[in-house]
Each structure stands twice: as structure tokens, then as C-alpha cells.
Image (spheres, rainbow, N blue to C red):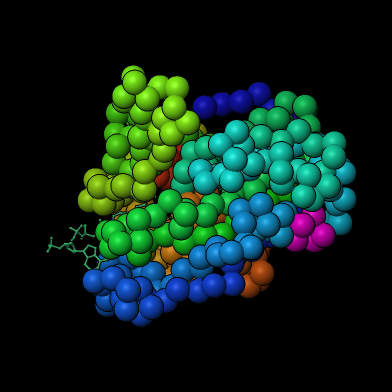
Amino acid sequence: MKSSITQGVRILATGSAVPDWCISNKILSDLIDTSDEWIFTRTGIKERRIALGDTSLIQMASLAAMQALRQASISPVEIDLIILATSSPNDLFGSASQLQAEIGANKAVAFDITAACSGFVIAIVTATQFIQNGSYRNVLVVGADVLSKWIDWSDRRTCVLFGDGAGAILLQACSSIQNNILGFQLDTNGEKFDHLNIHYNGNKDKADFLSAKSNGNYGYITMNGKEVYKFAVSKVPDSIMKCLASLNLSIEEVNWLLLHQANKRILHAVADRLNIPKYKLISNLAKYGNTSAASIPLALDEAINEGKIKQGDLFVVSGFGAGLTWGTVILKWIC
Ligand code: COA
């Protein structure tokens, strides 16, 4: 989709945070019928971080946000807009306002985006529209999830995959010559929503309608792993090709492929389909598992801190997951 650009968007800084508590495959295999060998060969995951006790979504999101703000020497009161991509808010009405209060961003408008593992890409695209059309100057985008709270820890098909974390990116309006965010492609297929979801179990009993316990509840994450795998390896390469073509860019010009960190086999299959060599893949999945909306900013922040990224590098960033939703955003690294 094309947008009318009046100004560019610059990436000022990134940040990330994960809980301290680390659960290795070995620990999991002491608790349920699984093994390090099964998990690692099928997913590439070795361990994941889990938010326990005092560690909350808001705390992690705040830590990641403050890191980015400090790095850019921007005060929280200079932020105009906060977008929190999360599917595990600690308030069903949204958690972005708590993040706004926690970091003291008193002048910022704040809202959540719920789009599971595509959430961060959709949030970046949303932020970009507000900046490019001249509405806002400084926008903080945070991807944070605590899916550990929505996992059935006795279900070995899902519990080995997910972890908790948060990542942030700070965007600012700039001249169109310095623009970092070149284009995007977003897609949705709601007909397949039940391949990966957290279902709401509503009350079906009319007689209980007014009773305090009649409000229903949410279930655990359920997933058709094979269908989700097939969806990701077919739709994500298409999305990337469409996005590159809309910008007249070729695969050879791509320096980094940063995919939602779901599964090493998905990452490799997408790279293979696109003929992108594996050394261009950014991945920290072994350490954190699938952290949903946090996975892309977490991996981006780590890659930047490791000094991997050079001036002018072209990034292809794709998210995919529940909805089903998927999307690509193409970034040029100009600091
Ligand atoms: N440990 C050990 N065995 C396990 C297991 C685990 N954690 N989870 C499943 N198994 C078993 C199954 O019970 C099954 O046994 P059976 O043949 O005796 O019935 C066997 O392993 C194969 O299960 P299956 O579900 O067919 O595995 P798979 O090869 O499809 O791999 C996934 C499972 C989840 C790794 C794979 O489907 C996948 O990566 N899907 C994408 C998931 C994803 O990334 N989701 C998030 C997207 S945002």
C-alpha cells in the first residue's frame, strides 16, 4: 500500500528487557514429557525467560522504553505518542496508558495494538503513518508480551515454544532524505484464526446471566503447529517479495532479514525460499523462544548492540502469527 509522505521517519534508538528467570529445555524436560533434543531440533530454542512474581509486562516495557529514551537523550515528556503492541495486557482495556504513566510521558497519547506476533510490525507501520502525515514528532513503539501467563504448562505442543520479553524503538520525524522506513505490506486472513488463538469461553447458561461468576474466561494458547508452519513459510516470502517490488528493490540488496523469532526452521525455510544466505538472518531465538510482539525489537536491539548493523544497511523485517496476520516493513539504517 502506498502512503502520501510529507516527512520522513528516523529510528533514533532501541531498547529491550527480559525477565531474570531462565527456563532451559533441560528444566522443562524434568517437568513434562519432552527433551532438549526434540525442542532444539524442531524449533532452535534452548531456553526462554519467564516473568514471575514482581516482573510485569509494564515493568519490562518501561525498562525497554527508558533504555531507548536515554540512548537518544529524549525526555519522556517529549514523546507525543506511545503504541504498545501486546496480546497479553495486564488490563483488558489496554496497558499503554500504564506504560505512559510509569515512564512519565505525560504529554503522550497512548494506545495498544493487539496483533500477536505481527503486533510490532503493525505498530511500526501505524506509528509511521502518524509521523509521515505530520501529526506527531516523537513516537515510542514498544512490543511486549508475557504469553507464559496464557500457556497450559502441561501442553508440551505449545509450552516449549514461548517466552516473555519487551523491546522498544523510538521514532522521530525527519526530512524525507533521512527517511529510515521505506515501505510496508500488511495482510490478514481471519478465516484461519483458529489455527492459533486464545479462545474466550463465554457463559452459555442464561440462568447464570446475572450471577457474579457468569462472565466467562479465556482459555490457553491453542495451536495447529503444522498449519501455522505452512502458513508462515508460504505467506512471509510472498509478503517480502511484494514489499521489495513496490520499492523497486532486489533480494540482493537486502543486508539483513529480521523475522519474528518463532522457530529456526521457519526462519531458514523463508530465507531459502528467498535465496537469502543464512548469515543475513538475525536470530536470538535460542535464548528467548517466541516472545510474540517483543521478538523483533528484542532481536533488533541485540543486533545493534553487537555492532552488526552498518550505516546504509537494508533490513527486511517481517512479523507473522495469530489472526492470522502477517506483514513486512523495510528499513534503511541511517543514523
Ligand atoms: N516434546 C516431545 N514430543 C513432542 C512435543 C514436545 N514438546 N510436542 C509434540 N511432540 C510429539 C507429538 O505428540 C507427536 O507425537 P506422535 O507422533 O507420537 O503423535 C510428535 O511429537 C510430532 O508432533 P507434531 O505436532 O507433528 O510435530 P511437528 O513436526 O509439526 O513440530 C512444531 C511441532 C510446533 C515444532 C511445528 O509444527 C512448528 O514449528 N509449527 C510452527 C509453530 C509456531 O512457530 N507457532 C508460532 C507462530 S507465531
In the rendering, at what x and y percent does residue 320 appear? Answer: 42, 45
Q: Which residue is drawn at 31% across and 24% down?
A: 205
Q: Is residue 321 or residue 163 the one in the foreground?
A: 163
Q: Does residue 113 lie above or below 20 as drawn? A: above
265 displayed left or right of 83:
left
Residue nearer the viewer, 259 or 116: 116
Tell me the quadrant of the picture where the C terminus can be found: bottom right
212 over 100 or under it: above or below: above
Give the residue at x 77% y 57%. Answer: 66
Q: Is residue 89 left or right of residue 136?
A: left
On the rendering, which quadrant does ligand 1 occupy? Answer: bottom left
Horizontal and vertical percent for residue 135? 77, 27
Residue extent of the magenta highlight: 66-71
Residue lying at 75% horizontally and 36% vertically, measured from the top left: 81
Query: Could you tell me which residue is drawn at 32 percent across and 78 percent down?
Result: 30
Query: Taking 170 as reference, is 72 left or right?
Result: right
Dominant secondary-structure state across the stretch colored magenta:
helix
Q: Quarter-wise, where is residue 266 in the image?
A: bottom left
Q: Where is residue 47 in the image (x, y as percent from the top left)?
A: 43, 73
208 in the magenta segment = no
At which x and y percent is residue 321?
Answer: 40, 44
